[in-house]
Amino acid sequence: MSLHGNLILNVKTLVLLDSGLIKGQVRSVSDRNTLTPGSNYAMSNGGGGAGGVSSSTHLLDLLEEPIPGVGTYDDFHTIDWVREKCKDRERHRKINSKKKESAWEFTKSLYDAWSGWLVVTLTGLASGALAGLIDIAADWMNDLKEGVCLSAMWFNHEQCCWGSNETTFAERDKCPQWKTWAELILGQAEGPGSYIMNYFMYTYWALAFAFLAVCLVKVFAPYACGSGIPEIKTILSGFIIRGYLGKWTLMIKTITLVLAVASGLSLGKEGPLVHVACCCGNIFSYLFPKYSKNEAKKREVCALEQTLLCVSVAFGAPIGGVLFSLEEVSYYFPLKTLWRSFFAALVAAFVLRSINPFGNSRLVLFYVEYHTPWYLFELFPFILLGVFGGLWGAFFIRANIAWCRRRKSTRFGKYPVLEVITVAAITAIVAFPNPYTRQNTSELIKELFTDCGPLESSQLCQYRSQMNGSQAYPEGSDAASTPGVYSAMWQLSLALIFKIIMTIFTFGLKVPSGLFIPSMAIGAIAGRIVGIAVEQLAYYHHDWFLFKEWCEVGADCITPGLYAMVGAAACLGGVTRMTVSLVVIVFELTGGLEYIVPLMAAVMTSKWVGDAFGREGIYESHIRLNGYPFLDAKEEFTHTTLAREVMRPRRNDPPLAVLTQDDLTLAELQAIINETSYNGFPVIVSKESQRLVGFALRRDITIAIENARRKQEGIMLNSRVYFTQHAPTLPADSPRPLKLRSILDMSPFTVTDHTPMEIVVDIFRKLGLRQCLVTHNGRLLGIITKKDILRHMAQMANQDPESIMFN
Amino acid sequence: MSLHGNLILNVKTLVLLDSGLIKGQVRSVSDRNTLTPGSNYAMSNGGGGAGGVSSSTHLLDLLEEPIPGVGTYDDFHTIDWVREKCKDRERHRKINSKKKESAWEFTKSLYDAWSGWLVVTLTGLASGALAGLIDIAADWMNDLKEGVCLSAMWFNHEQCCWGSNETTFAERDKCPQWKTWAELILGQAEGPGSYIMNYFMYTYWALAFAFLAVCLVKVFAPYACGSGIPEIKTILSGFIIRGYLGKWTLMIKTITLVLAVASGLSLGKEGPLVHVACCCGNIFSYLFPKYSKNEAKKREVCALEQTLLCVSVAFGAPIGGVLFSLEEVSYYFPLKTLWRSFFAALVAAFVLRSINPFGNSRLVLFYVEYHTPWYLFELFPFILLGVFGGLWGAFFIRANIAWCRRRKSTRFGKYPVLEVITVAAITAIVAFPNPYTRQNTSELIKELFTDCGPLESSQLCQYRSQMNGSQAYPEGSDAASTPGVYSAMWQLSLALIFKIIMTIFTFGLKVPSGLFIPSMAIGAIAGRIVGIAVEQLAYYHHDWFLFKEWCEVGADCITPGLYAMVGAAACLGGVTRMTVSLVVIVFELTGGLEYIVPLMAAVMTSKWVGDAFGREGIYESHIRLNGYPFLDAKEEFTHTTLAREVMRPRRNDPPLAVLTQDDLTLAELQAIINETSYNGFPVIVSKESQRLVGFALRRDITIAIENARRKQEGIMLNSRVYFTQHAPTLPADSPRPLKLRSILDMSPFTVTDHTPMEIVVDIFRKLGLRQCLVTHNGRLLGIITKKDILRHMAQMANQDPESIMFN
């Protein structure tokens, strides 16, 4: 059952198609493959395929012109990094050698050399502009749920009130131009009637936005749903999903992202922004032949630059972005790319700053400055927050994956629109009464991060001093809490529970949904609660030995905002399992080396606690849930298996399908191709010696035969096919032989059967192979594909290898 | 001539020994190798050696106990990363499997898991403390050249004057406790006599310090000289130089670094600090079996952490440090290490801060804050500075390498003490009259970076407003220059020329010498000159269309300090060819995202201009000059050679020395070992089939034979040696055969003869191989070692392959 090659795979693909998760031009795959059962080892469909270096073979047969179509890939296949890199180097050499011929060629070579920078600049400009537009549109639509600006419809609440005179800090939210829906429809601003009216309109708009978003996604671009990061990680690791980074996905994702954020669902826009930026990069790379014709180069554009664009655009942290992409997509990419990425991040950041969506001419979304240092004893609550972050991360991943699996496996997943509407309705109805859940999540985080300064009017800062008539919160005064703070604490606790539950059900809906903002919000709420608790403790018990030394009576020695920030970092760390880059991102937000130690303590604790419950982050879990062929670079292979235990054919399997180098006829070759569904075949000297000559791809063989039939005369079914340099000696009356050496990859990767699998895995990861041949004492024994490795790793982890393998 | 194996190599080693550059326990190498000429391909000495995975073989023969000594390395050999990694994984598995046996084993496994963090913490503490001590000692000794603090001998000038009452800013340098030498000896502070006295004492102390430094280096630790970064890069890439990171080197380098810095030579302490930190890491790693017994793990400790410690300790830029180490030593190291590195950097930074050598409780050496933004037209001078930086870098590298080559090849290099004394004398004599060269270079950079604020008393800030009696420099007032500024400009120009010349002759002296500070000083001087020029231009021609728009009349719109910073970054970039990390380091110094664009423009221009004259940075050039076996990860291999053109044996060479798996006698085996000097031998099935079985190391064979002679009875010269699982059938009267399977590496890396060299180079780089076997149709053809690749690359670059190859 488990090894039935393409038939199973195609069935599984169809199941996935049906579940709406992977759609696109998959038809090409299922059309092309004749659904033959009984093909038992893993060179099939996506896992197996072409290996090595066609460039070398081209160079050897310069007389034969290259056959068009050879060296491209089908949808849902894995690319061969080594081959792509060689292709690019050959292209580069050609351009370099032509360079001196004429001024035109020289210009072309210059253009080629600069096209990398051009792509990066264009992508940076476009993603920065899109990010700005998304911010502005989401803000406006978010405020539309509450009311409308009479003086100018296209202003959001804040912009509407800029012109107003009543801009004292207490009343900065109230201005005559801005009308809530109750004011507009009922004509009254206060009272239960208007409250219900506002409640109704809020829910109405939220449902409308959510409905629009899910319909757009369902109808126009099914790939636009989710955060996109798991798929992008898979694509960057070398898998081909056509249309995933296309213009339709870009357009629909941009629009629906605005709608989804505005609908008030518990989701963020940072993850989807990575997808948007990747789409931009992919579209611009089609303008340049250097990138459009090479899958590896295309990924290079997409890789670092776009991953980090997100972070830099979203948070204004370009260095953290660089580290983020290094931590997430580390292999295959030359460090040269880093420089370009950095440049792209900066371009995007500057475009974003000139669009100025946050209205404060800062690059940073959550810019905070704290004035008090932290004390050593505070490490204890920080570590507690780390534990909370780790527990939340582990719990969220388990619960979310369980829910997503349920959605995939039961009938429930067939009604995505209904599901989105339900979740949006519950979110809106529960969120409205609580001010902390009603407001925009990023604004909530900003408020929680901010320390109580003299200008702060938030309920969180209503300490006693403020009650005594003075509007300002005196520096270093007593921090006794008031009923206002207590009610804020209650509301925050309810918001925390609400956010935790809703986020689990929201991530994975068929709308664009990111995870950064909700995770940070949960952490920030928890952190702020802990922070206020510690502050009150220090205020009422300032004679405790702990506080005595550090905290003078009446002094303002605890910063609850810092606790919120540490909590946010811990929760984000628990969910994504990022480490260094996360600390750097948050560190860039505050701009002080001062707070790195609390952040590190919390993030490390969170990672350790989270890892105790399962080593995978949310993105890896979703990759595994969807069964993408992704070989994680971070996971270490720790078993003692040898290559011969993993390779196909296994003991009771039929022998490996191989081609001999010079004694097959065309009919025999076609029979082998038709009877099997492998993506490639090893070529050996003879059946007796089993000595390996090279590797030929199924796709290339088919194209070459068709090509020969069209162009060469005298090719018949009993023509001899040969892969050697010189034609074999044939009887006088035999038809003209067919030379296929130009499609033979003469440098396939080989390992011996005694090679430990840890080394094989290492080779696959570092070189980006598709398959590797296994030899013993110079004889061909079998083959290991990327899919075999993934299946073996799943087996080692006690998972059903077939249940998790999509391709 | 070119291929005479070990003889040539040993002679070269001796030459190098003689030149004093590589000293240590090289005897073991030359003793061990019988100097046989005619050994023609490159499995010799350092380049060749063991491959693959001994762990697998151990696992297969669990009955045979491992032979002590097998799997270690000789001095000046290259390690095999794959093998070391496997060894570590096996160790880890053993500990993990034992873990549940007893509480003691569990404690041991916990200790093992935490030892990485322990090493890192200890190293961070030690390097931070050492860096602080070096700073304090160098400051004190530097001031000793000028005078002495009467109230407390151990105070430097600044500390001495802290207690003084006359601390107005103009006279903060003058206080009664601090006596110059003229005041002490002649009893007068002014006048030509006291000037000459001070001049004499300055030169005297400089010479004394330099003499002491060079003598200490020469007598106790010849490895302590230079910056150490080229050697550390080579060691990290897998080369073994025993004693280079030892305790003697650490002690002597620390002491002489203080002396060298204090002597006023044009050198910095940042490069040598990397070496010091690496020594600390190496010494601490001996405390933990996990690290001391594994060369790859040892390098892991050393790698990222220590490289970045330098930058973070030296400049207070931990993130830049992480990127610096990624850019410089990118391969082989798991990203997990990143996290520990970051931690180590922070520990060191906090230790350094608590020692507080800069007296301002800041982590950052050159902390600056600018208040004016930059304007678009300023990009033009910034790019000019970039061009200057690139030109300076290219010029410096060429001149310095030419001078070092001359030193190595002529008799001149035999008198290192004389050379140091001469350079120190010239430096001191020329430097004293000019205040900008007399002062500490780091202080000079700090002064040049600082903007003219109201409290600035520097000559560089003597604008007209100050002349009009007011001490403070009014914000936004007119910036017309005074004679003071003009004389400062002259002095700066002279200082620039002086620094440029002296740095060329200083880098490479037999004292610890870094390059960061002198390069930055040159750039800062050039930048400040350009900055003041642009400022004056804007002041006198504020009606030009360029300035009109940006610069209001009388406004203070140019920041010369920013120009100095941009210039410093450009020059450092030109010399080291670092890119991103450099920008991040300087960005962390200023703490503003604002100035990244000018920095990037300058650093990129500088890199491009520099690359036009030669693609290598100063460290790579020194590596090449010394002929270390370093395979640069950044350099791309762009030629179309195939593996068969690079492999040995070449066409006219004698055949490859191979062992057959079961028909050699012990005498024959010993004959092969004695006649050749290769580090390892491929094992084949039989001479006829040439099918590859595995690879055996010379060192391992020798150890195994000795071991067998000692322990096993009946081993005679005509004993059959076999590498197979079962003993071959032998005649009844033959002596007991010797089984050597346990030392056979059964998974050697192979490539086919048609593999393009670019792929082979990629494999070597990414997997850290020592050698790779070449096959054709399953038959063994030859071997490619790291040395062959380096030699081939040198040939391709039109260099004499033998002249540059030390090992």
Image (cartoon, coloured by chain):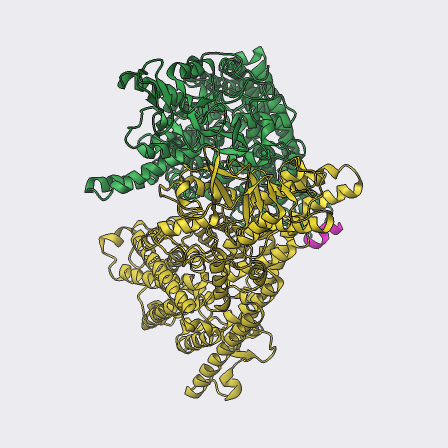
Chain colours: A yellow, B green
Residue B606 drawn above or below residue B716: below
Camera-nearest residue between A786 and B151: A786
In this rendering, would B491 be left or right of A20?
A: right
Numbered disc total = 0
The image shows residue B503, relative to residue A63, as above or below, that is above
In terms of secondary structure, what is the magenta stretch mainly?
helix
Confirm whether residue A317 shows in the render: yes
Magenta part of the chain: B544-552
- The quadrant in which residue B530 appears is top right
Given residues A81 and B666, the one toward you in this image is B666
- Name the image quarter holding the N terminus of chain A: bottom left
Task: Give percent across and percent down for residue A236.
Answer: 53, 52
Q: Quadrant of residue A273?
A: bottom right
Whole-percent x, y for residue A464 in the image: 33, 68
Q: Is residue B518 shown above or below A214?
A: above
**Is residue B467 among what the camera can see?**
no
In this rendered view, identify the residue nearer to me: B184 or A374. A374
Q: Is residue B374 magenta?
A: no
Q: Position of residue B161 (x, y in %)?
A: 43, 33
Q: Position of residue B681 (x, y in %)?
A: 45, 23
Task: Judge whether A350 appears above or below B693 on screen.
Answer: below
Asked whether B331 or B444 is in front, the reply is B331
Residue at 76% from the left image edge and 44% from the top image edge: A107
